[in-house]
Amino acid sequence: MLVLIFLILMSDEKLARAIRARSRRKIIKILCNQKRASVHEIADKLGLSESLASRHLKMLYDLGLIDNVYEPPEKFYFLKIKELKQLFDIYDKVTKYI
């Protein structure tokens, strides 16, 4: 039910743009499992440069999916919409059949 409400509130265009790139999907999954992570942690886990990870995080932030908190010396990112975990659980199940 919450996932449905989330999908209605967020335009399908924004959602499609957010999850189009595999790296952004992986970032969201990291934040689903880890609760929060720094750019450095995300870049290391995905084998990306910090610059590229930052660009993906900025897009997810601009789309309203994630938020951040600055705790010097790092900025930590976390899911703004907790229902994304449910959405990605369903996404993973569906993609197994494709």
Image (spheres, rainbow, N blue to C red):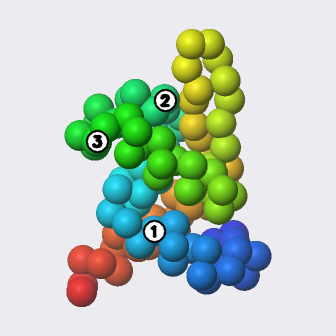
> Is the residue marked by circle 3 packed among few (<14), some (14-19), or many (20+) residues within 10 Å?
some
Q: In the image, is residue 23 above or below residue 18?
A: above
30 or 33, which lies in front? Answer: 30
Q: Report the residue at 57% width, 56% height from top.
A: 60
The C terminus lies in which quarter of the figure?
A: bottom left
Q: In the image, is residue 88 above or below residue 14?
A: above
| Residue 48, image x, y percentages | 28, 42
Q: Badge 3 is on which residue?
A: 48
Q: In the image, is residue 20 above or below residue 97?
A: above
Q: Badge 1 is on which residue?
A: 19
Tell me which numbered mark, 1 or 2, is placed earlier along the sequence. Answer: 1
Q: Nearer the viewer, mark 3 or mark 1?
A: 3
| Residue 15, image x, y percentages | 57, 73
Q: Report the residue at 29% width, 32% height from top.
A: 44
Question: Distance from label 2 to label 3 (Cα)?
Answer: 13 Å
The amino acid sitting under disc 3 is: Leu
Mark 2 residue element: strand
Question: Distance from label 1 to label 2 (Cα)?
Answer: 20 Å
Q: Report the residue at 76% width, 76% height from top.
A: 9
Mark 1 residue element: helix
2 vs 34, left or right, is right
Q: Badge 2 is on which residue?
A: 38
74 vs 71, left or right, is left
